[in-house]
Image (tube, grey):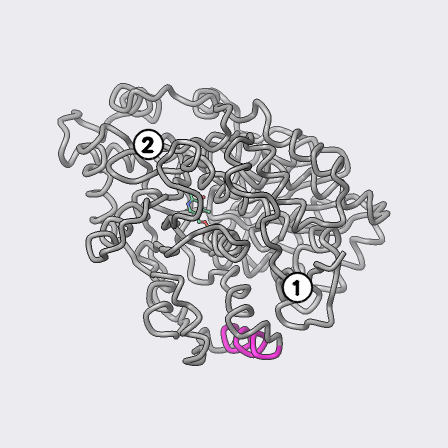
């Protein structure tokens, strides 16, 4: 058991994988990182003959090393089953000259299902291993997709409860509908009057509130997080990059050892960090292209070495990327600082007190694996049209941000490696935005007076892709959650739910 997890802000806080999953965030406010990045043990050629589940097992067992093989297998089997509407779980599509890795075939048609379908099982297994008797309460802030995916993952899982806070005006109508219609006695959904960062800070404050936590413990509850800061979210995401590579191998697009580039539409920096870890494991990834929307904090950071969240928060058509504090970046900061917890803690202090920090030139050199780009609203919409025109393939707004940035990157670079684009949501999740983008070049009639259902049918006709079950069911589902609160009342809501 050489691999353990330490806090990015205090390395003396050291835990096992299962403890890190249970705790979510370290006591000191830091994020858990593995003490070493394990190397892939099995050759990529061998993995190319494996199913998604088996590839996931080979990757995850290296990181979750205090789980037995049986425990891990059973978590994987419970997660990646017929909740996914494609047997290959994460199919890869060659369209318009690049490879779209479709991560949206789970219960809520967005990539967060990839991790949130397995997290509840990892958590309840971890609780058993650590003799935890209390009920696990998941507290989550969401910019849209995490909330629903977490609700779907945890609903009716014995020994757990889940509470989701979302910004009232910061998610798409379909995202909101998905959340407020969530079934399950152990679920609660609350809209807050504020933006996503405020919701996230509110949740972080609750986690830091010792008195509140003690009170909950005496009532038989412990708090945990399903946000992408939990390593139980991060580790399952590493798997699909390895899987994508092995599919390209199996299809003879590449030979073992050839480099692929990857573009990731980025918000909280979890998805792209998973790809960085895959690269550290030995996966031949060249550039990690980090794509932002108009909230381009990361683009500026990669260009200047300055992380500065002091700017206007922009609401875009890719709301799951409308983020000014990319929490998972802290892990990368820790690594490029040479696993330096003191320095990381100092940067994070500056971030919370001044909203800004600047990394050293030495650290900046270690960012050469990354390329930062961004696409504004116009470029995003145009990209949806361009790809549709080129291949008849319809992408969602988040994927379009990545696709636009990747297109620009490839135009300006001589590198000819295959480009894999993390395709993070089904176009059916953002139907109106997608159709509005398409209507710029296609004659698809009036949209303004159409209901969501009519638009959905229109998208089906245009894309030739069947309406996913998750969307079909939504139209007549009753609203089960209608609570709204101010940011400073979030702790009260927690107490209310658990009284
Ligand atoms: C969450 C999300 C993202 C951003 O992923 P991060 O891991 O937070 O960087 C991108 N696209 C969609 C559709 C998402 O739901």
Task: Tell me where residue 151 sits by quadrant.
Answer: top right
Q: Is residue 357 magenta?
A: no
Residue 404: x and y in percent read 26, 48
| Residue under pointer 2 | 431
Check contact, mark 1 vs mark 2: CB within 8 A: no
Residue 434: x and y in percent read 28, 35
Which of pointers 1 and 2 indicates the residue nearer the eye?
Answer: 1
Highlighted magenta segment, given as a residue range: 342-352
**Most foreground residue, 322 or 489:** 322
Q: Say if residue 88 shows up in the picture.
A: yes
Crowd tier of the residue under label 1, counting other residues whose Cα lies within 10 Å: few below 14, some 14–19, many 20 or above: some
| Residue under pointer 1 | 35
**Most foreground residue, 311 or 478:** 311
476 vs 351: above or below: above
339 vs 117: above or below: below
Q: CA distance from mark 1 to mark 2?
A: 42 Å
């Amino acid at each position: 058991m050489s691999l353990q997890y330490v806090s990015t802000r205090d390395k003396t806080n050291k835990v096992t994988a299962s403890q890190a999953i249970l705790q979510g965030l370290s006591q000191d406010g830091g994020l858990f990182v593995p003490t070493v990045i394990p190397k892939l043990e099995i050759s990529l050629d061998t993995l190319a003959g494996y199913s998604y589940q088996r590839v996931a097992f080979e990757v995850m067992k290296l990181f979750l090393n205090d789980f037995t093989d049986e425990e891990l297998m059973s978590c994987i089997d419970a997660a990646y089953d017929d909740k996914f509407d494609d047997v290959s779980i994460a199919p890869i599509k060659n369209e318009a000259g690049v490879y779209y890795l479709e991560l949206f075939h789970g219960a809520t048609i967005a990539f967060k299902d990839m991790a949130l379908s397995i997290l509840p099982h990892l958590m309840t297994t971890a609780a058993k291993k650590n003799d935890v008797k209390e009920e696990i309460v998941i507290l989550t802030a969401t910019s849209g997709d995490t909330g629903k995916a977490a609700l779907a993952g945890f609903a009716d899982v014995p020994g757990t409860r889940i509470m989701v806070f979302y910004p009232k005006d910061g998610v798409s109508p379909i995202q909101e509908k998905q959340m407020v219609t969530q079934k399950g006695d152990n679920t609660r959904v609350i809209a807050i009057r504020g933006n996503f960062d405020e919701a996230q800070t509110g949740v972080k404050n609750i986690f830091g509130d010792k008195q509140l936590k003690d009170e909950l413990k005496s009532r038989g509850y412990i708090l945990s997080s399903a946000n992408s800061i939990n390593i139980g979210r991060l580790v399952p995401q590493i798997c699909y990059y390895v899987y994508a590579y092995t599919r390209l191998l199996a299809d003879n697009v590449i030979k073992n050892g050839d480099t692929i580039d990857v573009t990731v539409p980025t918000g909280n920096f979890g998805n792209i960090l998973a790809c960085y870890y895959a690269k550290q494991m030995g996966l031949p990834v060249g550039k990690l292209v980090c794509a932002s929307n108009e909230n381009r904090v990361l683009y500026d950071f990669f260009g200047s070495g300055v992380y500065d969240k002091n700017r206007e928060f922009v609401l875009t058509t890719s709301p799951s990327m409308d983020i000014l504090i990319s929490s998972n970046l802290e892990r990368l900061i820790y690594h490029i600082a040479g696993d330096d917890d003191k320095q990381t803690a100092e940067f994070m202090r500056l971030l919370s007190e001044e909203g800004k920090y600047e990394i050293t030139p030495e650290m900046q050199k270690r960012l050469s694996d990354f390329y930062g780009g961004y696409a504004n609203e116009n470029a995003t919409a145009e990209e949806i049209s361009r790809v549709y025109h080129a291949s008849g393939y319809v992408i969602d707004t988040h994927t379009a941000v990545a696709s636009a940035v990747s297109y620009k990157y490839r135009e300006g670079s001589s590198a000819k490696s295959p480009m894999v684009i993390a395709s993070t949501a089904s176009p059916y999740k953002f139907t109106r935005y997608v159709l509005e983008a398409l209507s710029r070049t296609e004659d698809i009639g009036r949209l303004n007076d159409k209901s969501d259902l009519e638009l959905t049918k229109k998208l089906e006709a245009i894309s030739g892709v069947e309406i996913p079950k998750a969307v079909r069911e939504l139209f007549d589902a009753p609203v089960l959650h209608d609570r709204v609160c101010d940011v400073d009342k979030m702790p009260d809501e927690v107490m209310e739910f658990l009284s």
